[in-house]
Amino acid sequence: MTRTPSLILRYMRIPDLPQVMQIDQASFNPAWPERSYRFEINESTVSFMVVLAHQDEHTEEPVARRWWEIFPLTRRSSNGSKPSGEILAYGGL
């Protein structure tokens, strides 16, 4: 029996930046500078960045089921915790 990978869509965090930068550099020329992502994560009040990542089996972060659980109206802290798994994609809204 094949195990289905568990994915999570969550806010981008500073510890995600090395993986995000690898994806960005492979996808775009020129790539965004890291400082632009840091601004979007820490300072922007009109947009936010998200990542699609493998759900690490050891993380306690729940998988959201509804859009309002994924994108609540208030910003969450984005610096403190480690990435939950390998990042597959990212985007900004």
Image: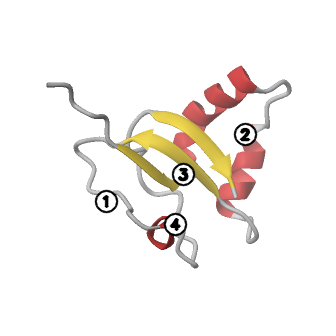
Q: 38 and 74: which one is in front?
A: 74
Mark 2 or mark 1, earlier in chain: 2
Separation (CA) of disc 2 from disc 1: 28 Å
Looking at this rendering, what residue extends furthest in the front direction?
Answer: 1
The amino acid beneath tag 4 is: Ser
- Residue 45 in picture, x, y percent from top left: 73, 71
The amino acid beneath tag 2 is: Glu
The circle on residue 72 is none
Q: Residues within 10 Å of mark 3 (few under 14, many from 20)?
A: many
- Going 52% across and 57% down the picture, which residue do you hit? 79
Residues at marks 4 and 1 touching, judged by CB atoms closer than 8 Å: no
Query: Disc 4 on helix, strand or loop?
Result: loop
> In this figure, which residue is indicated by the disc labeled 3?
13
> In this figure, which residue is indicated by the disc labeled 4?
77
Query: Disc 2 on helix, strand or loop?
Result: helix
> In this figure, which residue is indicated by the disc labeled 2?
34
Mark 3 or mark 1, earlier in chain: 3
Which of labels 2 and 1 is toward the front?
1
Q: Quadrant of residue 85?
A: top left
Q: Quadrant of residue 26?
A: top right
- Residue 91 in picture, x, y percent from top left: 65, 47
Q: Residues within 10 Å of mark 4 (few under 14, many from 20)?
A: few
